[in-house]
Amino acid sequence: MRIDIITIFPKMFAPVLNESIVKRAQRLGRVKICIHDLRDFTSDKHRKVDDRPFGGGSGMVMRPEPIFNAVEYIKSQLRNSATPQVILLCPQGKKLNQRLAKKLSERRHLILICGHYEGVDERVRQKLVDEEISIGDYVLTGGELPAMVLVDSVIRLIPGVLGDKNSLNFESFEGNLLEYPQYTRPAEFRGMRVPDILLSGNHNKIEVWRKTEAVKRTKTRRPDLLQERRNAYGQD
């Protein structure tokens, strides 16, 4: 997979992209991540990427020219590659969830545009962007943090990135259930014991216990997920 990120704050990404699973994925060659400074695609000496909105109003709007230039430049550099999915990170977009992250992890190439200020010129949405994505119903200063979240959530789903190929099957939101409670050594800590079933060695019973606890936890904390599960799978 290749991921191109267009931003006016390229230095924000190094601490995230050069650590942990994301760094490992790049080292293994599972993903190539390229950061592009939007100001490099401006045509004026001040490298201006924003301007006042037509019709008046507060704040500034990101200009279309640099964004179009950046995306077109990235596409022009591709050879024998799949058509990239162009994504705008913004509060108005579809909310990122595990299902969407899985879908994106199957793409060969993503181009992420980090929105800023009061948003982007509408012509970017109309003619350039394939999908708009938000990480939640709140407003951030810009699209850089959402881009980092999206990159992390997608990369870990690429086959071969995580050490244990089965670990993805038991995470929160898989099958619209939150993950079951987890325990490790010691078996007793400050008077709190690990459930006996987990120490029994009976893997069939452990599996049943985990499924029951996952449903119980989801019902308590995220009942909306259970409703989605009923709609999708016809079961609790």
Image: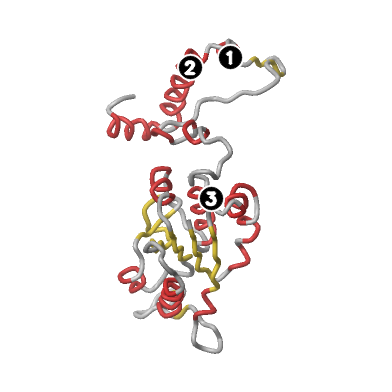
- Across and down, in percent, residue 50 comes to 47, 78
Q: Is residue 184 above or below residue 95?
A: above
In 3D space, how far apart are the residues under numbered discs 2 and 3 (Cα atoms)? 30 Å
Front one among 118 and 28:
28
Amino acid type assigned to the residue bearing label 2 in the image: Trp
Residue, x 47% and y 33% (percent of image)?
Answer: 169
Q: Which mark is residue 152?
A: 3
Q: Is residue 116 above or below residue 219?
A: below
Amino acid type assigned to the residue bearing label 3 in the image: Asp
Query: Considering only order in the chain, which callout, 3 or 2, is on the residue closer to the N terminus?
Result: 3
Residue 177 found in image quarter: top left
Residue found at the far bottom of this picture: 45
In 3D space, how far apart are the residues under numbered discs 1 and 2 (Cα atoms)? 10 Å
Please name the residue that numbered disc 1 is placed on. Answer: 195
Front one among 56 and 127:
127
Residue found at the far front of this picture: 80
Mark 3 element type = helix
Q: Is residue 135 left or right of residue 194?
A: left
Q: Is residue 83 above or below residue 180?
A: below
Query: Considering only order in the chain, which callout, 2 or 1, is on the residue closer to the N terminus?
Result: 1
Mark 2 element type = helix
Mark 1 element type = loop
Check whether the beta carbons of the residues at disc 2 and disc 3 lie within 8 A of each other.
Answer: no
Amino acid type assigned to the residue bearing label 1 in the image: Pro
